[in-house]
């Protein structure tokens, strides 16, 4: 492998690399954000515990919903994203609508990420002190209000490192979406390698670009996490949350 050839390929095809980087970042960032929203909904619903006074209908409904969500998580965590991409894209394309490939890519990576995020969020919820839930309920808050106002904000903070890791994973795993002809970084690299017949040099440049993207993401995520951990309050975290809720309830 020649370093000069690597620099030559980079200088000659930098516009193609930039296009691939742009597409990769759009898909990864959008998929992670939407996946987080899905994960919050799925993980939050699975973590909600019904009161002893809940009706039989609510208990049966909760059990059915939990079963459906568990199947969703197991399927998308237990199968490769490449297989999911091919199956979902062509299933929709041939039977429902001829959808845009970029929309398909974001949809696929979102629902895949959502399955992982759901378990991350659920773990984050379980890490919150049970006293938080009891204190909120003592103020008259429902299970849903407690989850949205008290538990989830703390769960997200506790699970932030794992959530950030999903973004880094998505930057790399978006490369499998080239199978549905998304013009992301790996797709562009294959085109350049096929044109120049310099496979080693082209993929070396591609590897360095991926390393740069993931390293930069890690630096940004670490800075955000550090800022979150260094946030100072006049009260301990548990006291701050319940104190805020009490003030809000009095204001109502």
Image (tube, rainbow, N blue to C red):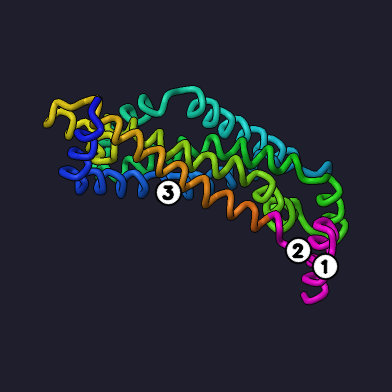
Alpha carbon separation for disc pair 2 and 3? 29 Å
Q: Residues within 10 Å of mark 1 (few under 14, many from 20)?
A: few
- Residue appearing at x 26%, y 48% in the figure: 18
Point out which mark residue 29 bears: 3
Indicate left or right for 187 with 216 as reference. left
- Of marks 2 and 3, which one's residue comes earlier in the chain? 3
Quadrant the C terminus occupies: bottom right
Q: Position of residue 153 (x, y in %)?
A: 68, 54
Q: Which residue is mark 1?
A: 234
**What residue range appears in magenta?**
229-252
Quadrant the N terminus occupies: top left
Indicate left or right for 216 with 118 as reference. left
Instruction: State the SS at label 3.
Output: helix
- The question of residue 188 being in magenta is answered with no
- Of marks 3 and 1, which one's residue comes earlier in the chain? 3
- Residue appearing at x 78%, y 65% in the figure: 233
Q: Position of residue 157 (x, y in %)?
A: 67, 50
- The question of residue 246 being in magenta is answered with yes
For the residues labelled 1 and 2, say whether their Cβ atoms are less than 8 Å apart: yes
**77 in relation to 48, above or below:** above
Instruction: State the SS at label 1.
Output: loop
Instruction: State the SS at label 2.
Output: loop
Q: Position of residue 165 (x, y in %)?
A: 54, 40
Quadrant of the rendered structure where residue 238 is?
A: bottom right
Asked if one can make out residue 180 in the rendered structure from this viewpoint, the answer is no
Foreground pick, 65 / 159:
159
């Amino acid at each position: 492998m020649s370093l000069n050839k690597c620099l030559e390929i980079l200088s000659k095809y930098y516009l193609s690399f930039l296009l691939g980087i742009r597409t990769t970042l759009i898909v990864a960032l959008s998929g992670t954000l939407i996946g987080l929203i899905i994960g919050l909904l799925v993980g939050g619903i699975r973590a909600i515990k019904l009161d002893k006074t809940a009706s039989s209908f609510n208990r049966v409904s909760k059990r059915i919903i939990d079963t459906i969500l568990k199947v969703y998580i197991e399927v998308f965590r237990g199968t490769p994203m490449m297989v999911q991409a091919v199956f979902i894209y062509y299933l929709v394309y041939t039977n429902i609508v001829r959808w845009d490939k970029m929309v398909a890519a974001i949809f696929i990576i979102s629902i895949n990420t959502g399955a992982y995020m759901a378990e991350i969020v659920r773990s984050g919820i379980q890490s919150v002190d049970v006293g938080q839930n009891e204190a909120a309920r003592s103020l008259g808050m429902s299970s849903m209000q407690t989850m949205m106002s008290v538990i989830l904000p703390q769960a997200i903070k506790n699970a932030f490192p794992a959530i950030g890791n999903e973004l880094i994973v998505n930057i790399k795993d978006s490369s499998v979406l080239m199978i549905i002809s998304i013009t992301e970084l790996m797709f562009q690299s294959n085109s350049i390698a096929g044109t120049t017949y310099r496979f080693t040099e082209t993929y070396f440049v591609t590897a360095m670009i991926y390393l740069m993207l993931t390293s930069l993401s890690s630096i940004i995520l670490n800075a955000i996490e550090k800022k979150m951990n260094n946030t100072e309050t006049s009260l301990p975290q548990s006291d701050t949350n319940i104190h805020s809720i009490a003030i809000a309830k009095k204001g109502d």
